[in-house]
Amino acid sequence: MQATPPLMPWPRRLELSGEWLAPARLREGAGADRRLTKAMERLNAMLNASGEGTLDVGFQLARHQPGVPGLGDDEAFRLEIAADGVTVSAHGTWGALHALTTLAQLADATGRLPVGTIEDEPRFSWRGLMLDVVRHFASARALYDILDVMAFYKLNVLHLHLSDDQGFRLPSEAWPKLPSPEHYTHKQLGELVQRAADRGIRVVPELDMPGHVTSWLAAYPQWAPPRQGAEEGGQRPAHRGAEGNSVEAPRDVRTSRRFGPHEAVLNVADDAVYSAIDALLGELAELFPDSYVHMGGDEVNPAWWSQSPEVGAYMALNELDDARALQAHFNERVAAMAAGHGKRLLGWDEVLDGGAPPGMVVQTWRGATARDRALGAGHGCVESSGYYLDLFYPADLHHAWDPGAPLETLLSQEDAMLEDMRFQHVAEGMKWTRQWRAGAKEPVSGESGPRQRAGGSQQGVLGGEACLWTELVDERVLPVRLWSRMPVIAERLWSAAPPRGDPGRRLEASLQRAAAAGLVDVRGTSRRLLLESGVLESQLDAVELLEPVKWYARLLGGQALEARIEGNEMPASRPYDADTPLNRPVDALLPESFAARRFARLLEGGADCLRDECERLLETCEAGGLLPELEAPIGKLAGLLKTVLDALDGGSDRAEAAATVAAAATPSGEYVVAAAPAVRAWLERQ
């Protein structure tokens, strides 16, 4: 029996005897319902058992749950694996589904199961994935596949970001011009909700408003605020305002393909806009049975409001002093409409700036202090600050970010990143979160939201969501970007006491099990995409020692990155837009190099194996035939390998070696040499 089974998330209690049961097909025993029967079919497909025997699985459930899951449902289970059969005990269906998932993770490559007992339950009730399907569309088939892997890692919320400046992915009968050419049908979303429920997963939709609405206004320009002051070519004919002043009618807004800040906002002074929103919320309620709906509320630019006499008059009538108060007023009206459809609102943490409506759940993303601002204001919180998958961060960083940790701990982790060699090239930009630290409100006893049922050390912390914004992610690269680190976040949200230390080896073992189960092959997909990008098969082992640059460095480009670091307005020009092909090696690379992890382990081992590997890789680096964009980073890798070989021979100059390592950690275009930090640590030990 292996010392550490490939379980991720890690269970609360695990007792394995060391015995193994022969491969067998699992047979439905007593106590199963339709949903569990379907889950058993999926489980047998994942086990791919080579034996001819059968093993009964019996279910002891307090109640079956034929509907959809909800926040706070009991997901605990007990799993007993013995020679005479498997017994699953749970309060309800959701716990039983998690027990079957655990069986799939425990099985070895031949379908054998270990004898033993597992008792488990989640730490947090909200364990989610936010997927942006606007910047790059993900087909319904891709979403169905995502649900299978989510269930494997015991995630229970799929949050779909369905609208933004670049598109609108929701079908609408009330407003038929809204949906983009690529959007989901009612049938697809109905199947998505049903498939999700069959796996114990909730689907939470998001329509982002009142900002991020360029796509809305391109379809219905009358929803934009009329503004004073003509702009060449962008306005309709002027009309007279209430006070006789010249006011431009709503401008014609074109569909946007660019990324970055947009000025478009809804006319929050117009009752017709609220009627449109109410109709959309009604359509959402019919499609998505979950009790929550996300309204966005982030990154609202108030410029158009400030230029609109109509909005100004509305603010005066409602005694609203500024744009923050105006947005808070808008949020309250939307919350009331959502309640009329039986829904509660979520919003990104900007909704706190003017005061969020009572009962609203806040999804926090702007640094560690956002969580405590939400809690201090009496709101439940879904934490995402440490879980942005599109920033190319390594797994250990995500795994260490605990939604229930004391604020001082989280701030210390933010500060430590600035000293981490892996982020030196973007450290100045990462100080961005410090602007929200001043005046951060600590949670006050009695003011916070609902208590977390099991184990959360902060009142009102419902759990967390990983976020994958898709400016640099299309459907081809989605498995590489999403699942290469998502399992460690799933563990952080589920496990009360995950194993200490770097989760890297367990992550790789878990992903290998997911690949063997036919769910997702992260490394295999990455290598295939590298080959399709023009990398030669003989070059793969060397190229896999590279990583994409971190944080927003790729998305912003050099000019915009420098502007953000300096705190200036970001220029519109960026190296990517929604039409940029994502077919280069940098798009195919793992955000965190597994090859670099293995190389780091070689540095810890014997000199002979290390020398052989360095010489082999160096030969590849110097063989030529590289794509032009890879020549500089692979050249730096070659210098790093020579430094290791020199050190093994005892002829390394420390200053020269340090300079070589520092150069390797410095970006070449959009690449860094992932092995540089491990080499520096090894040299310091010599």
Image (spheres, rainbow, N blue to C red):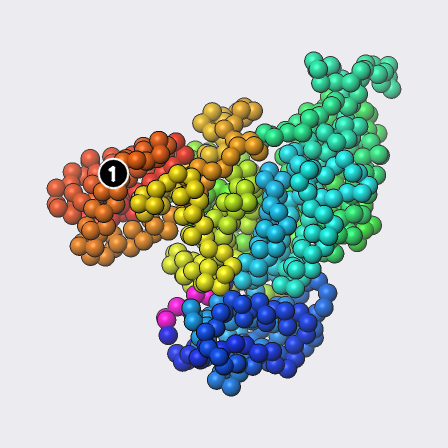
Can residue 567 be found in the magenta stretch?
no
Q: What stretch is highlighted in magenta?
A: 2-8
Position above or below: 110 against 576: below
Q: What residue type is labelled 1?
A: Ala
Q: How crowded is mark 1: few (under 14 residues within 10 Å), some or many (20 or more)?
A: few
Quadrant where the N terminus is found in the figure: bottom left
Residue at (84% x, 16% y) in the render: 239
Report which residue position mark 1 lands on: 623
Report the side of 674 relative to 463 (left or right): left
Residue at (69% x, 56% y) in the render: 191
In the rendering, at what x and y percent does residue 86 appear?
54, 80
Can residue 3 be found in the magenta stretch?
yes
Position above or below: 82 against 469: below
Closer to the camera in the image, 172 or 335? 172
Residue 72 image-quadrant placement: bottom right
What SS does tag 1 mark? loop
Secondary structure of the magenta portion, mostly? loop
Residue 166 shows in the view: yes
Position above or below: 303 against 578: above
In the rendering, at what x and y percent does residue 104 appear?
51, 68
Residue at (87% x, 19% y) in the render: 242
